[in-house]
Amino acid sequence: MATIPSFYETPSPAGQTGIRAWLLTHDHKRLGLMYLWAILFWFVIGITVGFLIRIELMTMGRTIMSAQVYNSAFTLHGVIMVFLVVIPVIPAIFGNFFLPIQLGTDDVFFPRLNLLSWYLYMFGGGLAVVSLFTAGGFPDTGWTFYVPFSIGTKHNVPLTVFAAFILGMSSMLTGLNFITTVHRKRSPTMGWMQIPLFTWSLYATAWVQLLATPVISITLLLVIVERLFSIGLFDPDKGGDPILYQHLFWMYSHPAVYVMILPGMGVISEIIPTFSRKAIFGYKAIVFSSLGIASAGSLVWAHHMFVSGMSDTAVFVFSLLTFLVAIPSAIKVFSWVSTLYKASIEMTPPLLYTLVFIYLFSVGGLTGLVLGAAGPNIHVHDTHFVVAHFHFTILGGTGFAFFAALHYWWPKMFGIMYDFRRAYIAATLATVGFLFHYVPMFIVGLMGMPRRSYDYLPQFSRGNGLAAVGGMLLFSGIILMVVNLLLSFRKKTPATANPWGGCTLEWTVPSPPPLHNFSKEPLIKEYPYDFSDILKNPPKN
Amino acid sequence: MTNQPDQTGVRISMWLFLYTEIILFGGLFVLYAVYFYDFSADFVQGGKELDRVIGTLNTVLLLVSSFTVAASITAIRRQTKRLCLLLLASSFLCGLIFLINKYFEWGHKFAHDIYPNSPALTSGPHGRNIFFGLYYVITGLHGLHVIIGMTLLGVSFVLVYQNKITAQRFALLENSGLYWHLVDLIWIFVFPLFYLIL
């Protein structure tokens, strides 16, 4: 088994060399890595823009940019982070790389379609870049492109919206591919309740991607149509109703936040049992809560619109449904914590990121209930409270899950180990920075500071000053983390096939895996989190 | 492993893809539903202005073409290549006539100053503007799908001609056929919503 060349040495299709072996590849692992570099690029751009916004808000009045630039900057930050980073980050990188391996198969169902998804992603990203510099510059509408402003503004809305449309197609095709792969390419001996939880979460996510994305596609197309032909479907002067745009938009964009968080929860469900050396608590409960979040989460979109003037009955129903989503999320958190209880915990960088995730995500989830409740929502609607809430769930949740996944699977993907000490420092720095950044935003939000505003009243200056300091710490922590991972290519400390003592299938193959993943038919365990073999032969580092 | 493609998997994913197309139009039907509720009288009035004869003709054309596509799949499975090509060509032709009809229908409306953002529409009743706005958006997007469907049928035609689609391997033809049925299905909803509202 030791002599099988890794997928780096075996191009697929065979015979391609150099850059062509990557750009024309059908190998899910190479595609996963190509997504990794592309998404990391956008992620660094995204956090840099976010950081600049934070610096701008550090002091009252103009700090580093004009109000016009500020409007485009927060739109750019939102568009990059939502469409180019957070939605694809875990499914496209780790899903592509590990879903087939966890299922005991050699590739996704449609390898060429997978390549097409990557090209659509790159094309969409390229269009976003072009829209920065053409026809009026990047939109100043916020990533939500609300009408009527998005129809009226002179900035380059159509091209950016079209870029988001293309990225939606990419995401949809990935979802389609994953669903088919889970159904048709799963190892024949693997039953539904033997699928690892990460793959389960991707499966639930894929359904949401498939069910919800077409709605945003049509909504974005309508914005383009309105820009080109001014039909007036959302223009009150011509009989249209702008609120309908918001409904259509959130019908996708709320489920999309579950596209963002579910795979992150899947990552956490893998990491916790591995470093607890213990079967995960409530495997089935986690599976069904993933499906529950995916289905209930598709029915809550109008909680973004409580102040838009809809009927009290609708507010009541959507508020109730929003509260229901909290139940499966809480089931997961309790299951993770129960797994840790009385476990022989081994502390590693991925576990540290995971623990931070649980804490930050819980805060994010609970503040979500404040927003989902019809009464308090009126008070905090469109304030920095909302911004802090979703950064707790998306950066503290999905972001930290992404960092955990990077540290967990890095040795598997590249066959090398990174420096632990720097990883711990980076994680601590990022966490402390995170709290200093976003906790003050909750407070200034409750005090009434509106989001997306360029300037603020004197009573908000202490909170914003603190947040800027937190932003600097957070930014440097994340940069240090990325640098530390990249430095591992220099030292090239080799990693073993199973450095952590994981027991899902990806840890049974060499690091990095060979082209067809398995050199012999993989043995599917009765239960995916059975650690009895690992406990007998603990991994040596 | 890929020598024997998994036909069931291909079919599953095609159905999933068709589902996304239905949702794409679903968003527009939601708009229609809300605006019909708001402007029922104007919608009924607008519907009377559309040419029911051409609409019915187009419906018949698409239904016939759906039949010929389905028959072409049976034909290739029975290894009657000539018949298959003939049936595919007639489906393609039906699609083409559909588009030509649509062209004249739209042209006729344009001639009466009914086009997006036309002064006649924007200064008239709101409901009428929305009705014709939706009419152009929905039939336009549907027309785009007709063109995509015809392209798929054309590709299938060439591949059948080159013997690349055979009685053993006809997934592409089958999926093109499914896509064409989808185009038909959507029209079955579009037709009564615009031409037959009372």
Image (cartoon, rainbow, N blue to C red):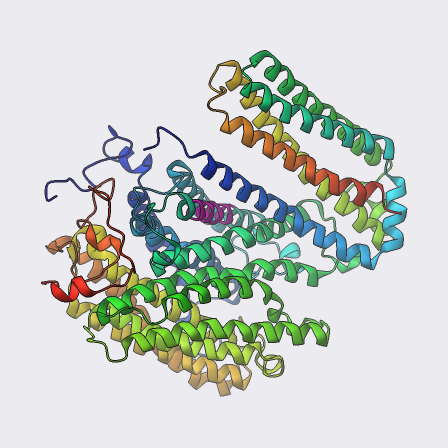
Q: Is residue A314 above or below residue B66?
A: below
Residue at 10 percent across and 44 percent down: it is: A2
A289 displayed left or right of A374: left
Left or right? Give the position of B106 relative to A145: right
Q: Which residues are magenta?
A: A166-180
Q: Residue at x 18, y 72 (%)?
A: A346
Residue A65, visible in the rendered structure: yes
SS assignment for the magenta stretch, majority: helix
Residue A473, by quadrant, is: bottom left
- Residue at (85% x, 46% y) in the render: B197
Instruction: Please give left or right for residue A13 compared with residue B13 in the image.
Output: left
Give above or below for A481 relative to A331: above
**x and y percentages locating residue A443 in the rendered image:** 47, 85
Q: Nearer the viewer, residue A500 or B116?
A: A500
Quarter placement of the N terminus of chain A: top left
In the displayed structure, would residue A407 be above or below residue B106? below
Decide: is A196 above or below B180. below
| Residue A296 placement (x, y as % from top left) | 55, 66
Q: Is residue A515 covered in magenta?
A: no
Of residues A184 and A134, which is closer to you in this image? Answer: A184
| Residue B24 shown left or right of residue A186 in the figure | right
A179 is within the stretch colored magenta:
yes
Quadrant assignment for the C terminus of chain A: bottom left
Q: Residue furthest top?
A: B82
Query: As rendered, which of A236 and A273 lies closer to the eye?
Result: A273
Count of all numbered marks drawn on residues in the image = 0
What residue appears at the point 51 percent right and 75 percent down from the top-left corner? Answer: A386
| Location of residue B116 in the rendering, given as x and y in whole percent from the top left corner | 76, 44
Q: Quadrant of residue A87?
A: bottom left
Residue A124 place in picture, x, y as percent: 46, 46
| Any part of residue A455 in sight | no
